[in-house]
Image: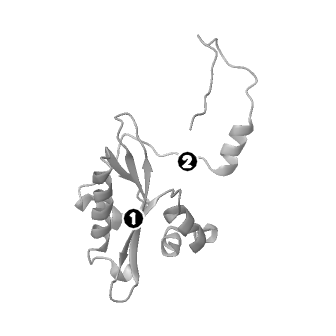
């Protein structure tokens, strides 16, 4: 994971420790699934894929999001990435997922060519957005002065588990 953080330029804010990885990926209430490609002769990790699952969306099928796919530079071009994607696709099939999504770092032409060779396609009708922690913290703490217009029903926000 540090290799990916270095490649994508966020190593200085990388916070994953072995203990946290164990808890968050393999613990009782796992937050993700991880597929690992390993050289069985040496035990060396060649690559990995982190997958998040959104339980259901409009079609009542889960969406799998490939959050990270990384193959060590010396292992690229040997089928490791394809094997990892095959494992992710098998997970999606087992869960009867409706779709598998992922993002590609702009300028990573090799990654785009790789995903396209597997049948992946660029999504043209969605624009990715992000809100960082200080911004969503400020938004959560803000109080509207008034609501414009008159809603037909008073707004209610329910939080359910």
Quadrant in which the C terminus appears: top right
Picture residue at 36% right of the left edge, 36% below the top: 60
Residue 49: image location, x then y, percent: 40, 65
Q: Are marks 1 and 2 in contact (CB under 8 Å)?
A: no
Picture residue at 68% right of the left edge, 19% below the top: 147
Q: Can you say whether 105 is above or below 122 in the image? A: below
Q: Can you say whether 91 is above or below 98 in the image? A: below
- Is any part of residue 129 visible from this angle? yes
| Secondary structure of the residue carrying numbered label 1 | loop
Picture residue at 47% right of the left edge, 46% below the top: 128
Labels 1, 2: front one: 2
Q: Can you say whether 62 is above or below 8 in the image? A: above
Picture residue at 34% right of the left edge, 80% below the top: 75
Q: Residue furthest front?
A: 28
Q: From the viewer's side, name the closer residue of 140 and 160.
A: 160
Residue 85: image location, x then y, percent: 31, 63
Q: Which residue is mark 1?
A: 108
Residue 50: image location, x then y, percent: 43, 62
Q: Is residue 138 left or right of residue 65?
A: right
Give the Cα distance between marks 1 and 2: 20 Å
| Secondary structure of the residue carrying numbered label 2 | loop
Q: Residues within 10 Å of mark 1 (few under 14, many from 20)?
A: few
Q: Is residue 50 left or right of residue 78?
A: right
Q: Is residue 151 left or right of residue 52?
A: right
Q: Which residue is mark 2?
A: 130
């Amino acid at each position: 994971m540090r290799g990916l953080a270095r490649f994508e330029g966020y190593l200085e804010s990388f916070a994953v420790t072995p203990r946290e990885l164990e808890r968050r990926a393999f613990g009782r209430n796992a937050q993700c699934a991880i597929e690992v490609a390993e050289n069985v002769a040496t035990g060396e990790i060649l690559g990995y894929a982190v997958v998040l699952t959104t339980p259901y969306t409009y079609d009542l099928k889960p969406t799998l999001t490939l959050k990270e796919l990384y193959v060590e530079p010396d292992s690229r071009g040997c089928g490791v990435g394809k094997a990892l994607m095959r494992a992710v696709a098998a997970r999606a099939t087992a869960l009867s997922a409706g779709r598998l999504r992922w993002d590609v770092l702009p300028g990573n032409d090799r990654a785009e060519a790789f995903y396209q060779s597997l049948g992946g396609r660029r999504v043209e009708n969605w624009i990715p957005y992000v809100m960082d922690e200080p911004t969503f913290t400020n938004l959560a703490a803000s109080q509207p002065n008034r609501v414009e217009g008159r809603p037909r029903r008073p707004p209610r926000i329910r939080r359910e588990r």
